[in-house]
Amino acid sequence: MIKTLAQKELVSARRDKRFMLLGAITVLLLMVAAVSGVVSYNQLSTERAVAQHAADHNFKSQPARHPHRMAHYGSYAFRPKSSLSFFDFGLDTYTGTMVYLEAHQQNSANFSAVQQSGGLLRFGEMTVAFVLQWLIPLLIIFLTFNTFTQEKEQETVKVLLSQGLTIAQIAQAKLQGYAWALALIIVPALLAASLFLLLANGLSIDADFLLRLLLFFAAYLVYFFIFLAGSILISALNQHSRSALLLLLGIWITACVIMPKVTANWGSLLYQTPTKAEMDATVHHAASHGINGHNPQDKRTAEFTKTLLAKYHVDSVSQLPVNIDGLVMAEGEAYSSKVYAREFDKLADTYHRQSSVSEWAGLLNPYLAIRYVSMALAGTDAAHYVHFLKAAEAYRYGLAQHLNQLQATQLHYHDKETRLDNSHWKSYPAFTYQEPSVMWALSRHWVSVAALLLWGGLLYFFFTQLITRYFTL
């Protein structure tokens, strides 16, 4: 009987012109977002791969030079696009994509999409995530707001109850019927979007990508279930369709529009971040307490020289078996990098604290929970961005110290004329970035994962109990 009633709800939904119209619009928007996302992903991936190759080629093609000149010539690190980033652009639009790597200096990432486009981009983008997070819940609301209230207004619910069905069984049947109706819209669109992505990747697939994709779909299934069960529950507990619709729309506006803005601003007020100028000034001031390789009168350089002379039991730097110029540069690089890493960790921790306000609010608002889970699985959240910046900084530090080591071992003291053959930097490995695993990504957002599962679990176990207890004719 439940199956029959569920099929009846499915048929009713398919005959509902509002649902068919909204469903067609939603599918169209979903496909447009998927296609434009894949096109953008292909274009940006190609551009960044070409740019990275050109930067590596230019560095390796430099002629014979003094190693410290090569350290200042530097190179570039371009952030590759995550395979699933076309589903959810996340913070990618606002974060930089390229870091200039040079000696003594830790540069921030530049050339974000916002910097290179007009102001319209700040009003949002049509992405798959936008359709799934905003428009599908709206479609669910318009599909289900009168699922029980209409039965009450037309008094058909009494007929159903007289057939021996309980109100819990009717609710389960409606839940199943509308879930099938939604699946008719969402599943083909998502499968088509996945196929586009696989074709764009040349049908290349690995375990991490597959796991991210499956978890992505699973997370959104839980999210849709929350809205579907919640909408039917509210319809069951209201007497009139109009009041149920107004209440559901009020919840949608609060959850998807008002609360994200409020929690983001609250987080910014509670945990304020320094400006770039303040950050640079702090790092510069702290680094000034270390060795300055370009200042021979520096007191710390003199102390380091004294220590080195004692270590090798010689009287002058010209008697050292190594070039002290390179060692001084290496010491200064190590100190300034340590200072930068400490200040950058503080900044990243502040960003994390800011976003944690919104993440904990996910316990009240499943939209906030799915937003962070979605970005994490797509590799477009702040944690992935920080991971890339740290990888770029690790490469910059390794490259600078490699060149300092060449200066220390291949050149004589105060030798600024000798040029080393370019085979020394031609053989140095190019910058490559390995995206962290999906488990690493989700561990950064365990609060959001827990909030989403908690919402889904509570509604799954208490959906029929709540309707049974509070339903009135």
Image: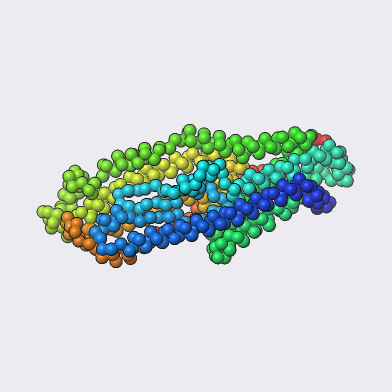
Residue 178 visible in the displayed image = no
Residue plotted at (17% across, 50% down): 305
Query: Residue 130: x, y in percent?
Result: 60, 47
Q: Quadrant of the C terminus?
A: top right
Q: Residue at x 42, y 52 (%)?
A: 98
Residue at x-position 38% and y-position 55%: 76
Query: Measured from the top left, where is residue 304 in percent x and y?
Result: 20, 49
Above or below for 269 versus 26: above
Residue 202 quadrant: bottom right
Q: Nearer the viewer, residue 82 or 287?
A: 82
* Front residue (pair 254, 359): 254
Q: What number of labels is visible?
A: 0
From the viewer's perspective, is residue 362 above or below residue 92?
A: above
Q: Quadrant of residue 58?
A: bottom left
**Residue at horizontal 88 percent and vertical 42 percent from the top:** 159
- Color style of the picture: rainbow
On the image, the x and y values in percent for residue 64 come to 26, 63
Q: Is residue 13 visible?
A: yes
Residue 55 at x, y percent in the picture: 38, 59
Above or below for 326 versus 120: below
**Which residue ends up furthest to the front in the rendered image?**
118
